[in-house]
Structures are given as structure tokens and as C-alpha cells.
Image (cartoon, rainbow, N blue to C red):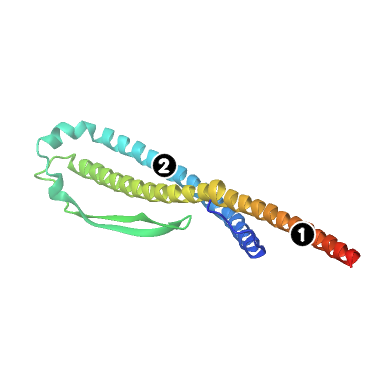
Amino acid sequence: MSHVRASKQELKRQRDALSRFERYLPTLQLKKRQLQMEIRRVEAKERAAEAGLAAAEAALGPWVGLLAANLPITDHLAIAAVRRGHTNIAGIDVPVLEDLVFARTPPDLHVTAPFLDDAVAACETLARLRMERRVLAEQRRRLADELRITSQRVNLFEKVKIPEAERAIRSIRIALGDQQAAEVVRAKIAKSKAMEQEAST
């Protein structure tokens, strides 16, 4: 902490600063708790998406060999548009998946395998879940970045700014008290000298 001047003006400045820090800190602490809660919620959604992906991949199991044998999935299914929006979570702008639009070309049932419809539906589910997982990962990353910044601010207020202001106030009070005591002593000495001079005349 830099040296502070022992003056009533500086004492007021430090008291005002302390009051401001103490007023702002609870808001930061609340934001930190909200962010931690939201990150846990997003992580739970990510786990659900992972479980959904595992189930969708398992559902594709019977066709994996056939898919490898150039089953024409891409002839019948393509992502036409990814519709992403934004929402505000704990004061942070985060992306949300609004919709995944597919372009579908119905297979000719006379020339394609009978299970192609099911394989296309499973691939669609898989694509949707993968996109959802990607958006959730982005949500978590943004919230985690904001949590890191907010935690740094909470630490700055709790461990640096508030203790610094408290130390400065204590130091100024002591110095002002010492100045006052010194003034009283000087006044007594001056009065004593004046009385001595009066007595000698």
C-alpha cells in the first residue's frame, strides 16, 4: 500500500472508498454464486447430451458395418441450417441452439435398403445431439471465463482493497491522534512559557 497522507480529507476519502468496496462486494459474491450454479446446471445438461449421444451411437450399432459399406446416408440427409440464438445467464450473453434444420430427400424404397429410413433418423438424432453438446460446451466456456474474472474481483476486494482501506483508516486515525496530542503538548508548553514570562516581569 502506498503511503497515505494523515489528513481529515484523506480519512474521508478512505472511508468513502471502504464503504463503496463493502457495498459492491456482496453483488460480486452473489454473481459468483449464480455463475457457479449455472455452470453446474450446464454441466448436467452436457452429461445428459453425452448420455443421449451414447444411446444414439448404440442405436446405430447394427448399421455400422453397412454404413461403412457406403450406405448413401448423405444422399438423403444434410444439415440445411443451424439456428442459434442468445440468452442471458447471470448477466452473460451465451449461445443457445434454437433449431437444427435438415434437408431430407426421401429414399426410393425400390432401390434402397429397407432400414435406410431408420439409419437416416438415427443420424439426424446424432447430429442434433452433437450440435447441442457443442453449444453447451460454448455456454460452459463463457460462464467459466466470467466466473474466473468475477472470482478475481471478489479476491481483489476481499484480500486487497478492503484490508488496504481499513489499514489506511487505522493509520490515519493514529497519526491524527498523535498530531492532536502533539498540539495539546505544544499548547501547554506555550502556555507555561507565557506564564513564566508574565511572572518574570
Front residue of 52 and 94? 94
Sequence-first disc among 2 and 1: 2
Q: Position of residue 97 (x, y in %)?
A: 34, 54
Kind of residue indicated by mark 2:
Glu
Q: Which quarter of the figure has residue 50? A: top left
Identify whether 68 is placed above or below 15.
above
Q: Position of residue 87 (x, y in %)?
A: 41, 58
The residues bearing labels 2 and 1 have C-alpha atoms spaced at a distance of: 70 Å
Q: Position of residue 15 (x, y in %)?
A: 64, 59
Provide the secondary structure element on which disc 2 rests: helix
Q: Is residue 155 left or right of residue 136?
A: right
Mark 2: few/some/many CA within 10 Å (<14, 14-19, 20+)? some
Q: Which label belongs to residue 67? A: none
Q: Residue furthest front?
A: 201
Residue 162 visible to an observer of this rendering: yes
Q: Which label belongs to residue 186? A: 1
Give the residue number, with chain letter if any, for mark 2. Answer: 43
Identify whether 134 is placed above or below 199.
above
On-image quarter of the C terminus = bottom right
Q: Position of residue 53 (x, y in %)?
A: 31, 38
